[in-house]
Amino acid sequence: REFGASLDNMARIYPEDVYSPDAVRIYGVGGPDWRNLDKKVAALIQDFKGNPNRTITIYRAVPKDAPTGINAGDWVTPLREYADLHGKGRFGDEAYRIDEIKVRAGDIFTDGNSWFEWGYDPRPVRKPYPEKLITAAARMKSDMIGASRAGNIVEVRKGTSKGFVKVDEDRIRNFNPKELERAVFRVRRDGGSVVPVRAYGEALYLTKWSDIPLDVRKEVFGGDVKVWRAWVKSKGWQDQNSPLYKYLRENNFGRAVVGDDRRAGGVSHIVLPEAVGEAGRGREVTKLTRAQIETAQAEADAALDIAQPLQGTKERRLARTILRRKEKSRRTRPAVSPYYDDESLLAMINNG
């Protein structure tokens, strides 16, 4: 068990191509006498992948006068035809019998020498895990796998152990809920260095219902606080089709801040890919350019209106007041020409 692979997870000892159409050619015994058996065992391996609790019948050839039954530690085979070949070759045509038993696919193991011969090593019967533990472990494994696929190093500390151990995706998938009951994990870049990445754009805070803007409550959560709570609990932001992403893009936000569990420090920052790095910088420049052009155009339109002939003293006084206010506004905010385009602004930023 410790050094072998069970029928449901052959990739622990074989390469992934054991599940490919080329498995018979690569790992089969070969020859006309074995080709049919090779095909049958390859089909079993593919059929039982990822199903450790599925039942399979195993066989063992023994002398006719041997005690009945198959015990833990016995060598077995999942093919009746192979058991017959083994019995005839070892004991003679009439001197053996075939014992059989139904077992879990996760209870037979191979060391990789032959995919016809397996060791029977049943796991002790245990009580089912609590539903809460299963759910929590599944979420934790999902977070770790996501971090691993993003190119990060994932390390786990289980229970009362003092140190962190590096784990890959296969190991993460094989954790049972009990192993993760008191476990914590951390994520770091290769070599231990953290690479800072700047995200551009304003943040939308969704940590408290009372702080969420009314239009967000309506568009993203249907105006229902219960929907928002369920969304937070299930980490609904992991769904790329969530209305949240549409709202962030349409309203020029760069990220959202949401409440998360304690392992994430209480909050998570959900950053749009287009708001990161150079792409985010260009997006923000486009946004600022548009806003500045609109502001400059509005000021030009207002100045044009004021420049029209004024007939009365009251109108002239009002016009002077508006001009003083606009002059004060210009002194407190750098003037931006309406003729700057995106390329000009980017050049200004890049040149300091």
Image: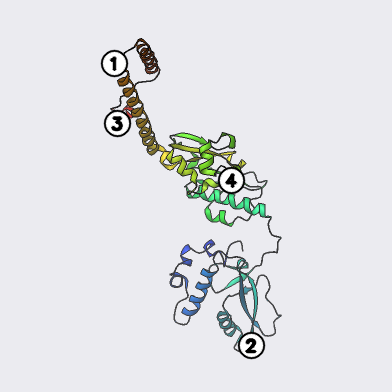
Q: Is residue 319 or residue 69 the one in the foreground?
A: 319
Position of residue 281 in the picture relative to residue 120 (left or right): left
Give the residue number, with chain letter if any, for mark 1: 309
Q: Is residue 91 visible?
A: yes
In the rendered structure, find residue 227 and report the number of the disc placed on it: 4
Q: Gap in Å between the C-alphas at discs 4 and 2?
A: 70 Å
SS type, badge 2? loop
For label 3, count other residues whose C-alpha is less than 10 Å away and answer few (under 14), some (14-19) or many (20+).
some
Q: In whole angstroms, how far apart are the C-alphas of marks 3 and 4?
A: 43 Å
State which mark lies toward you, 2 or 3.
3
Give coordinates of residue 168: x percent, y percent.
53, 52
- Residue pointed to by mark 2: 95
Asked if disc 4 and disc 2 are in contact, CB closer than 8 Å, the reply is: no
Closer to the eye: label 3 or 4:
4
- Label 1 sits on what residue type? Pro
Kind of residue at badge 4: Val
Closer to the chain start, of discs 1 and 4, is 4
**Badge 3 amino acid:** Asp
Marks 1/4: CA–CA distance: 58 Å
Among numbered discs 2 and 3, the one appearing first in the sequence: 2
Pointer 3: what residue? 341
Label 3–label 4 contact, CB within 8 A: no
Mark 3 or 1, nearer chain start: 1
Question: Percent x, y for residue 176?
Answer: 63, 56
Which callout, 3 or 1, points to the residue nearer the camera?
1
**Judging from the image, what secondary structure is the residue with disc 1 in?**
loop
Q: Using the rendered view, name the quadrant where residue 65 is placed.
A: bottom right
Image point 50% across, 47% down: which residue? Answer: 242
User: Of callouts 2 and 1, which one flags the residue occurring earlier in the amino acid sequence?
Assistant: 2
Image point (36%, 36%), residue name: 282
Location of residue 123 with respect to 192 vertically, above or below? below
> Is residue 209 positioned above or below 166 on the image?
above
